[in-house]
Amino acid sequence: MLLSDRDVLATVKVPTTSDVGSGIVAAVRTILEQGQASPAAVEAVMIGTTHFTNAFVQRHDLAKVHCLRLGLPASRGVPPFSGWPDDVRDAVFAGRTLVRGGYEFDGRTIGELDEDAVEEVARTLQRDGVGQLAISGIFSQINDDQERRAAQIVQRAAPEIEVSLSSELGRTGLIERENAAIMNASLRPLAEKVATAFADALATLGLDCPYYVSQNDGTLMSADHMRSYPVLTFAAGPTNSLRGAAWLTGASDAIVVDIGGTTSDVGVLVKNFPRQSSVHVDVGGVRTNFRMPDVLSVGLGGGSRVREQDGVVTVGPDSVGYRLTEEALIFGGEQLTASDIAVAGGWAQIGDRERLGAIDPALVTGAAEAIRQIVATAIDKVKTSPDPMPMILVGGGGVLVNQQPPGVSEMMRPDHAGVANAIGAAIGQVSGEVDSIFAITDPTEREHALEQARKEATDKAIEAGAAAGSVEITDIETFPLQYLPGGATRVFCRAVGDLAIKETVGG
């Protein structure tokens, strides 16, 4: 998708290619031709990818990882890799070591870091040829000194080992944060290949501009950042769709239904950004605590199979998926799909209507009702209030919905809805986050803690590439932790700013 300010100049969809780069070359070359734009006119390229999510879920291209936890004498009861599915554990596991270290919630030391033990781990990994190390420490998101010191020791003893720190990736919660670091480490060699493929593809096209990759929260990160933190792209797909829907309609608070070929993702926009999940998220069966959008996926897409048995019509959840243009009736295939129903009902004009033949009107009515029920139920599940909300339909399968579902005040179907995902990636901003625990016992300490969180989040956004004058605090929340002493309060703060493209291009 080629964008100039708020004008969509060209769009194209091409299948994902196994080598990543050739698909990007084909897509970008086509949209440059359609948009009649020269490579020199392109200021930046934004890429949204599910490559790393797919690699982890499908257990391919994963590197072996050793996990070093700083926490003894605490935490030995639940060692690293606990609870991992056997197949992914077998693909990633290269050992685990627990050494003295770690902090209390307020930053007090549980144990001094055992530096000799850390150095011994580094030398052992070097001898065994293990190139990836994940380091986690108890409450390291409060104080990351020991994690960083351990990384220094490892890099001094064995410079070729790449280190992923849990304090840079996850949030409060040792096991989930540690899992995030392990997952990230397992993907770093693949991230290097993908980053190189992206850069080579742009060079082939003569594009002398930076490229950015969209991440979980709907903002962007640089290519170098992706090399070090590939795990932060895991939820970029649905996030981009929600952000694109907001941009296309101007709606800041709405339900977004993104219907693809096999599934539909249903999420909620709050102040232009996806509502975030408040619970732990499993990725490929591994428990993590990334900040992920709260999205419900249901088995409804343009390729969903339609069946009738004993007078009952069902739609999905199985689908012909990417073979829609080969197997659907309207494209000359033999499978009755949800797309065929939309064409037969007269609310979509795709494929060849004549190929449907004499389809039973009762079957069309029954399938349309099944689709309506799936969408209505999903919307009901994501809503937190009985009050009607606007709904935005995006994705290529948006044509399946022909009636406004209950609980919806307005049904929007914007132009370019089929490429909302790409638009969400292209308009991505840059963010900085703080998620820490402060000891707050009076109003003065509270204000000081909030101000510190705002400043740290703003500094992180600017460091990530945001233009300083554009950064705003978009979210700040406090959660008193009743089970901890001393007024322990968890503070989450997020700052977002516009990408400083001009400065980056010039540099």
Image (cartoon, rainbow, N blue to C red):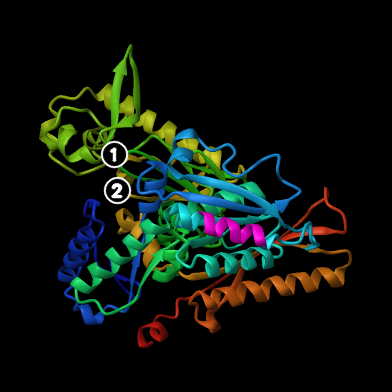
Viewer-proximal residue among 228 and 248: 228
Across and down, in percent, residue 17 comes to 22, 52
Query: In the rendered structure, which disc, 1 or 2, sits on the residue that comes first in sequence?
Result: 1
* Vertical placement of residue 404 versus 489, above or below: above
Percent of width and height locating residue 98: 65, 49
Asked whether residue 282 appears in the rendered view, the answer is yes
Is residue 117 found inside the magenta-colored segment of the image?
yes
Q: Which residue is mark 1?
A: 302
Residue shown at the point (42%, 70%) measured from the top left: 224
Task: Please identify the quarter of the rendering in which residue 501 is found.
Answer: bottom left
- The quadrant of the image that shows the N terminus is bottom left
**Contact between labelled residues 2 and 1, with CB atoms less than 8 Å apart:** yes
Q: In front here: 349 or 58? A: 58
- Classify 10 Å Cα crowding around label 1: few (below 14), some (14-19), many (20 and above): many
Residue 354 locus on image (x, y percent): 10, 34
Q: In whole angstroms, how far apart are the C-alphas of marks 1 and 2?
A: 8 Å
Q: Is residue 1 magenta?
A: no
Task: Identify the element where label 2 is drawn.
Answer: helix
- Which segment did they paint magenta? 116-124
Q: Residues within 10 Å of mark 2 (few under 14, many from 20)?
A: some
Quarter of the image that includes the C terminus? bottom left
User: For numbered disc 1, what is the local secondary structure?
Assistant: loop
- At a point 88% along the width and 58% down the height, the residue shown is 486
